[in-house]
Amino acid sequence: MKKSVSVKFDRRRKYYLILDCETATLPCADGLPENEKKKIAIAKPLIYDLGWTIVDKKGNIYLRENYLISEIFSVPSIFNTAYYAHKRPLYLEKLDKGEIVLTDWRTAVSRLEFALSITEAVGAYNAIFDFKKAIPFTELYINQLYSADFHKWLNFQNECCERIVNDTVIGNNKEFDPNCFRFRSKEYPLFDLWGLSCEYLLNNDDYKGACLRNGWQTESGKYFKTSAETTYRFASGKLDFDEAHTAIDDADIESEIFALIVKKAKNQVEMGIEYFPFRILGTVRKFVSQHPEFADLVDFEI
């Protein structure tokens, strides 16, 4: 992985922010069956691990920052709802080694705002989750946490979670701009590495064949996996690579993926979020019907 080459920024150069976060959710999800907890975690994500890199189009990293958010990480009833809660000893080790900083949300976000101020655009792998859900909801939660009405607000959120679990949520009509991240009255051009990877790196016979040979299909078997992990495995040739699922480590590999996309896209960075980008690759069945040499690798007849 590429190391930071500098911490001095040239205003004539274009920089891009690659962000990743790991999340927990509201305490009401603790102890629920995994399928119910997952629904709440997707709808109400609270960031405990926030990391980003600032890169150029070649993937050179100029800055890496990584923060544990104390209001989430240090509260067991919240952190224990995290899918990767078992990684807590790893984070404590990182803290001991000075590899990550434990701080409050406002301090971490002040650093993020600086990073945003010097970048051309911002992105993530599945940017809709990081920039449209996790950051806004964590911001909302922290603002409420320090208000006099926190318990009233939390009770309302608990009621919302009940509706989420029971699939009785009423959709909202809030305007959604797929090309922009709005935060604290400012706007930042937004790109999605997931959609761009599907378009420029994965929608080819080589990748689809690698998926079938290595078992990289979705749980249903209908689609090819298009995660950051499988994308990096294919792009790097490290077929046994396992994603760390810590914010800064994931941001590192996504910075490399970003550089490969830019190269394939003839030095362009396309803004916007593609909904369900894995569909760009088509179904496994369609691919195998066109390439019968892979028929022995699937459990259905053509």
Image (cartoon, helix red, strand yellow):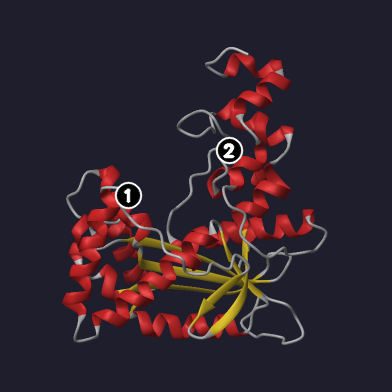
Please say if 37 is above or below 192: above
Question: Residue 103: x, y in percent?
Answer: 33, 80
Q: Quadrant of the C terminus?
A: top right
Q: Badge 1 is on which residue?
A: 38
Question: Residue 155: x, y in percent?
Answer: 18, 69
Q: Amino acid at mark 1?
A: Lys
Tell me the element at label 2. loop
Q: Nearer the viewer, residue 94 or 64?
A: 64
Q: Residue furthest right?
A: 266
Question: Residue 140: x, y in percent?
Answer: 35, 76
Please say if 11 is above or below 208: below
Q: CA distance from mark 2 to mark 1?
A: 28 Å
Q: Nearer the viewer, residue 4 or 248?
A: 248
| Mark 1 residue crowding within 10 angstroms, few (<14) / some (14–19) / many (20+) | some
| Mark 2 residue crowding within 10 angstroms, few (<14) / some (14–19) / many (20+) | some
Q: Quadrant of residue 259?
A: bottom right
